[in-house]
Image: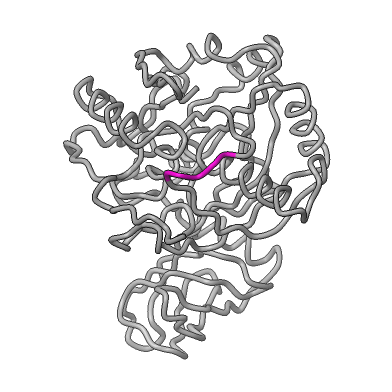
C-alpha cells in the first residue's frame, strides 16, 4: 500500500515575536501549563506546579537525564584570522567529532580555538556537517571545552550575556554529569525543580531516568514538502536495566507512562520498536542510536501521556505531539495559547497531553 503523503504546511502557524521567551520563568515551576485532553481535545489553563494534580500515584514519569555541554566554539582561521564557529554535534571517537561549521571553510583548514585547542576540518559530509579532528582528547579536551566553550542556546534566544547564568538556566536540575552529551536542552524538563520532584515522589509517582543526547535529530529543520520523506539524524539513546524493569512493571500493571519531553518520548518509542520487532524483550536494558521520526499515523508503543513545550512551526517536534493528540487538536491548542499570550519555545511555557 502506498504511504499517504502529509504536507509540511499542515504544521505551520504564525507566532508573534514577542511570545518567544528569552528567559525562563522564576521560579521554574511557575511557568504556565496548557492541559490538553489526548482523547477529548478539551483544554484547561493551569500553572506548571499544578502538574501534581494531573499525575497520580503509580504513574511513571520518564525524564531525560542527558546533560548539555558548552558545544559552541568560536575560533579563527590559521593564517588569515577569519572567525569560524564550530558547533560540536556528535562524538565519533577520541579527538574526532561531527560538527556544524559556520563561515567560508575548506578541507584541511586549521582553526585556532584558544587555550591551546586546535581543530582541523577533515571531511565535508555533504549534509551540512563536517568531520573535525582536535589536537586534544579525553579529559583534557573536556576541560578545555568547559573553559572556552559556549552554551548552545537556540538562535532565537539572545542569552543573558553571562555564561555562568546561561549554563545554570539552560540545564535541567536532574542532568547527570556522567551523561554529558546534549547540544540542546530537553526543554520540557527545564520547568522542574528539585522540590517539585520530591513532592511528586511523595505522592507515589515513580520517576525513571533515561538518556537521549540531543542533537540534529531533535532540532534540525524538516524541509521535505511531504514530511513522510524526511530523514532524521541519529541520536544516542540509553535505558538502564533498572529503568527497563520499571517500565516493564508499569506496562504489566497497566500504569500510565508519562514522558517528560519529546526526547524522552523518542527513547520510549525507540525501545518499543525494538521490542515489537523482536530484538529485545520488555524489561531488558537498551543502548544504541535512533533516528525514529514520529508523525501523525504513528501508533505509540509505550508513551501514554506527554509533558512538552510549544514547538517551532514545521518542526519534527510539532509533528510528534500531533501524532499523540491529533494535528487538529494541537493546532487549536496552539491557537489558544497564542491568544492567551503563552510564552513559546525553549524557555517558554508547557503543555500536558494526557
Relative horizontal placement of residue 1, taking residue 138 as reference (left or right):
left
For residue 108, above or below residue 175: below
For residue 255, above or below residue 137: above
In which quarter of the view is residue 35 placed? top left
Relative horizontal placement of residue 137, taking residue 90 as reference (left or right):
right
- Please say which color scheme the image uses: one colour
Return the residue nearer the eye: 345 or 23: 345
- Look at 41% across and 85% down and name the residue there: 78
Instruction: Report the span colored magenta.
Output: 296-300
Residue 37 x/y as whole percent: 43, 20
For residue 311, above or below residue 100: above
Q: How many numbered marks does the figure carry?
A: 0
Residue 332 x/y as whole percent: 27, 28
The answer to if 335 sits in the magenta stretch is no
For residue 231, above or below residue 44: below
Return the residue nearer the eye: 134 or 240: 240
In which quarter of the view is residue 144 placed? bottom right
Residue 172 x/y as whole percent: 55, 35
- Look at 42% across and 58% down and name the residue there: 3
Q: Which SS type dominates the magenta stretch?
A: loop
Q: Can you name the residue that lies furthest to the front here?
A: 1
Amino acid at each position: 500500500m502506498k504511504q499517504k503523503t502529509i504536507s509540511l504546511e499542515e504544521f505551520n502557524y504564525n507566532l508573534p515575536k514577542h511570545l518567544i521567551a528569552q528567559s525562563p520563568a522564576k521560579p521554574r515551576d511557575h511557568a504556565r501549563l496548557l492541559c490538553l485532553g489526548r482523547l477529548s481535545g478539551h483544554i484547561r489553563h493551569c500553572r506548571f506546579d499544578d502538574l501534581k494534580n494531573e499525575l497520580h500515584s503509580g504513574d511513571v514519569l520518564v525524564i531525560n537525564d542527558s546533560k548539555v555541554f558548552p558545544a559552541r566554539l568560536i575560533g579563527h582561521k590559521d593564517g588569515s584570522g577569519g572567525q569560524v564557529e564550530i558547533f560540536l554535534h556528535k562524538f565519533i571517537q577520541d579527538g574526532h567529532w561531527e560538527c556544524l561549521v559556520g563561515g567560508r571553510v575548506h578541507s584541511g583548514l586549521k582553526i585556532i580555538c584558544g587555550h591551546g585547542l586546535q581543530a582541523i576540518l577533515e571531511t565535508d559530509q555533504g549534509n551540512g556537517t563536517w568531520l573535525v579532528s582536535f589536537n586534544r582528547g579525553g579529559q583534557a579536551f573536556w576541560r578545555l571545552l568547559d573553559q572556552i566553550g559556549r552554551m548552545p542556546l537556540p538562535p532565537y534566544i539572545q542569552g543573558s550575556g553571562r555564561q555562568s547564568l546561561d549554563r545554570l538556566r539552560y540545564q535541567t536540575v536532574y542532568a547527570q554529569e556522567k551523561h554529558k552529551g546534549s547540544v540542546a536542552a530537553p526543554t520540557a524538563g527545564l520547568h522542574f525543580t528539585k522540590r517539585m520532584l520530591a513532592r511528586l515522589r511523595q505522592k507515589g509517582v515513580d520517576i525513571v531516568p533515561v538518556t537521549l543526547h540531543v542533537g540534529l535529530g531533535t532540532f534540525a529543520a524538516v524541509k521535505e514538502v511531504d514530511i513522510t520523506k524526511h530523514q532524521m539524524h541519529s541520536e544516542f539513546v540509553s535505558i538502564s536495566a533498572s529503568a527497563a524493569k520499571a517500565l516493564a512493571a508499569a506496562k504489566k500493571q497497566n500504569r500510565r507512562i508519562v514522558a517528560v519531553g519529546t526526547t524522552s518520548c523518542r527513547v520510549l518509542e525507540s525501545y518499543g520498536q525494538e521490542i515489537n520487532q523482536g530484538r529485545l524483550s520488555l524489561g531488558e536494558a537498551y543502548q544504541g542510536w535512533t533516528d525514529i521520526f514520529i508523525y501523525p499515523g504513528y501508533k505509540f508503543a509505550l508513551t501514554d501521556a506527554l509533558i512538552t513545550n510549544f514547538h517551532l512551526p514545521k518542526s519534527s517536534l510539532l509533528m510528534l505531539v500531533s501524532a499523540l493528540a491529533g494535528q487538529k487538536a494541537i493546532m487549536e491548542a496552539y491557537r489558544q495559547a497564542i491568544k492567551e499570550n503563552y510564552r513559546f519555545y525553549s524557555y517558554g511555557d508547557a503543555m500536558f497531553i494526557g
